[in-house]
Amino acid sequence: MGGILETFGLAWPKFISQVVIVLIVYFILSKYAFGPILAMLEARRQRIADGEENLKKIESELEKAEEKVQGMLDEANSDAERLITEARESAEAVRSQKTQEAVKEAQGIIEKAREASKMEHEKAMNELKSDFGRLVIDATSKVTGKVLDDADQKRINDETAGQVAL
Amino acid sequence: MEANLPIMSLDSLNPLLAAGGIAAPEIPGFGWLTNSILVAAVVTTCVVLFTRMATKRMELIPSGKQNFVEFIIEFLYGQVEGIVGKHVAPKAFPLLATVFIFILTANWFGLIPGVGTIGFGEEKIAFLSLKEVTHPILRPATADLNMTLALAVVFMVVWAWLSISELGLWGTIVHIFGPKGGLQGFLKYALMPIFIFVGIIEVVSIVFRPMSLSLRLLGNIFAGETLLVTMGGLGELLGASGFVAWILSVVFPLPFYFMEILVGALQATVFTLLCGVYIKLSTTHDDEDHH
């Protein structure tokens, strides 16, 4: 046995020093390499998992937001169509009212113009009658050579006016 | 005719064994400090310094050394987890990863030119040249039984702690000697002597594990060193001399260097794999076996 140990160079000091070296590597690697790196790998794995989860959440929220936006757009379109219809109806009503008012006003203006024209016509006729009566009186007075009194003048005037009215 | 073939005798091959023989020689003037302990210390320093530099300022987005070390550790953790299972992996990983990284680095360190060939000897043939190096300054750490046995013993201690922490002391004893296969009733008691006998064989195999692990690693690495030395001196043995011998000392070992790179990785893997399997076998609950 001793010969075998000697052949292989086995000796306690050498063996123990090699054990110490192995233990040093074991403890230092465990503490400064494996621990931190495995923790880092786990942190990275967790971060990726969190990222994936957040991505799913964001996609879900985006989908909901898109649905909400679509709903709002639909509602806005519906409101807009309703408002346009109401505005169109309202405009139609206003237009109709304004047209009626304009027609009514125009009729009033025409009526007033007609009355004014009628009055002007009557006034002109009256003035014409008066002038025509005066001319008849003057002509009668000159033809007859007689000074006509007020009663004559009134009678001639009335007769002339009566004939002119015919 | 026989006089022309002296190189074929075993005596002529003796000087071609790796310098110092199977026992790691002590460095002259340093007591029991052997060249393999020196290399083990150098390898330890290299591994520790490199990993410390890689993990000193760790960032969430890795780069450079941190990226490399993370790749190695993540890969190893996946392998260890695949062998020992998710439950035991966090406890077993530090030891198995240490064993793998250390053995791999030590094996490959032994392939650096100068390791095993620079040292002290008796017969000088020229300035700074010896006929034979009897005490090399550097020797692969895993080409020394002290180191390989140290690795195996440390593993066995951690293995025992893991087994007992997983199954308990009584559970471990039952695991080794108890009935297997979920036997119940009469058959269980009838076959008990067989299971006890199998348990004894199991204990013997456990006792021999450190020796088998350490001798396998030592044998392969020392054989590799010897092979390279033999190939390096083959030119001279074939009768070449001068420049031709020098060229042949480079050409002949070259293919074996690549083979030794592979052997270095393979032996580190085999040692670690066996350790993982031993842990798996001793930490598996019997009820898990049934599933």
Image: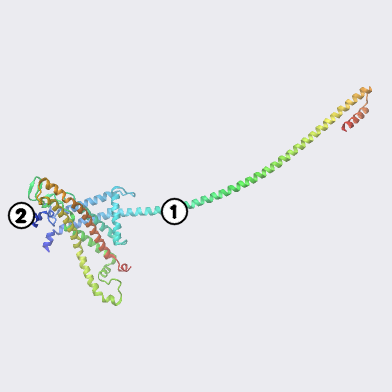
- Residue A41 as seen in the image, left or right of residue A102: left
Is label 1 in contact with label 2 (beta carbons under 8 Å)? no
Please, what is the three-letter code of the amino acid marked with disc 1?
A: Lys
Which dot marks residue A57?
A: 1
- Where is residue A115 shown, x and y percent of the image? 79, 36
- Residue B244 as seen in the image, left or right of residue B205: left
Residue plotted at (67% across, 45% down)? A93
Which dot marks residue B3?
A: 2
Please, what is the three-letter code of the amino acid marked with disc 2?
A: Ala
The residue carrying pointer 1 sits among few (fewer than 14), some (14 to 19) or many (20 or more) residues within 10 Å by Cα, namely few
Can residue A15 be seen here? Answer: no
Mark 2 residue element:
helix
Which quarter shows the N terminus of chain A? bottom left
Taking depth in this image into account, of A50 and B105 the one nearest to the observer is B105
- Where is residue B163 shown, x and y percent of the image? 26, 65
Between the residue at mark 1 and the residue at mark 2, the CA separation in whole angstroms equals 88 Å
Mark 1 residue element:
helix
Name of the residue lying farthest toward the front: B1
